[in-house]
Image: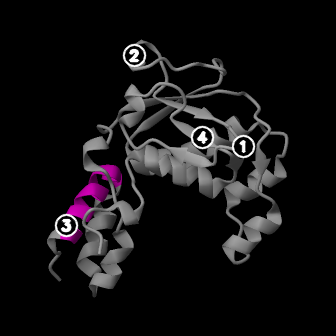
Amino acid sequence: MSITQNESDTYSCIQKILPQHQQELNDMVQNSKSPEHLQALSAAFFAKKLWPQRTQIKVAFTESDPKIRRSSLDEIHNHSQGTIDPLQQYAFDNPNTPIPKLIEKIVNERITPISGLDFIFDHDHTGYKKPKGGDTDSGDPHVLISFDDSGGAWSLVGTDCKAASGPTMNLGWFNVATVMHEFGHVLGMIHEHQNPRGK
């Protein structure tokens, strides 16, 4: 099966994001029987905002133990067709674990292993105020997470985090899927409807 230009670009982006899974990706492409199968690899990235491989991305928080709402077990069941993510179950089983520590666990177990990036979490400087155009080489965090419960969930995309002032991500509530979604943006992912090559 040949790969079209659009599929090839998507595959190339995924190769950059998942460098240690090259053989798996190659096997998936070679064994794909249709464009629909290959579509399982589809993701939209903002190529100019991808981090160089092995970048150490510093992450800090505006609060050490924010009091935002945690999604309930009923909400998770309603959205997951009854299957609970093991990390979400861990969060339910450990309700006294501060949310920043749960975020670190999610990123270390789900994002770091597939991204080719190193996330360094700073829990000692909560309340940090990121200056405009912060100098990340002198210790400023790349990613500063706030917890404004009226501000929704959002993140800047990829390397936009480096030059931003103030928070670069907000989590107005907590669940594993939302954390992974917003850290997908940190990696450089955009929503599919923002893909300029989308149909």
Q: Amino acid at mark 1?
A: Asp
In the figure, residue 72 lies in which quadrant?
bottom right
Give the left or right position of residue 195, taking residue 79 as reference: left
| Magenta region includes residue 166 | no
Q: Which residues are magenta?
A: 6-20
For the C terminus, which image quadrant? bottom left
What element does badge 2 sit on? Answer: loop
Give the left or right position of residue 11, taking residue 81 as reference: left
Q: Position of residue 100 (x, y in %)?
A: 68, 36
The numbered dot on residue 170 is 4
Q: Is residue 123 above or below residue 199?
A: above
What element does badge 1 sit on? Answer: loop
Which sits earlier in the primary sequence, circle 3 or circle 4?
Answer: 3
Q: Amino acid at mark 3?
A: Ser
Measure the C-alpha gap from mark 3 to mark 2. Answer: 36 Å
Measure the C-alpha gap from mark 1 to mark 4. Answer: 9 Å
Measure the C-alpha gap from mark 4 to mark 2. Answer: 21 Å
Disc nearest the viewer among 1 and 2: 1
What element does badge 3 sit on? Answer: helix
Disc nearest the viewer among 1 and 3: 1
Residue found at x 68% / y 37% = 147
Looking at this view, is 195 or 112 the one in front?
195
Residue assigned mark 3 = 8
Residue assigned mark 2 = 135
Residue found at x 23% / y 77% = 30
Looking at this view, is 41 or 169 the one in front?
169
Give the left or right position of residue 99, taking residue 14 as reference: right
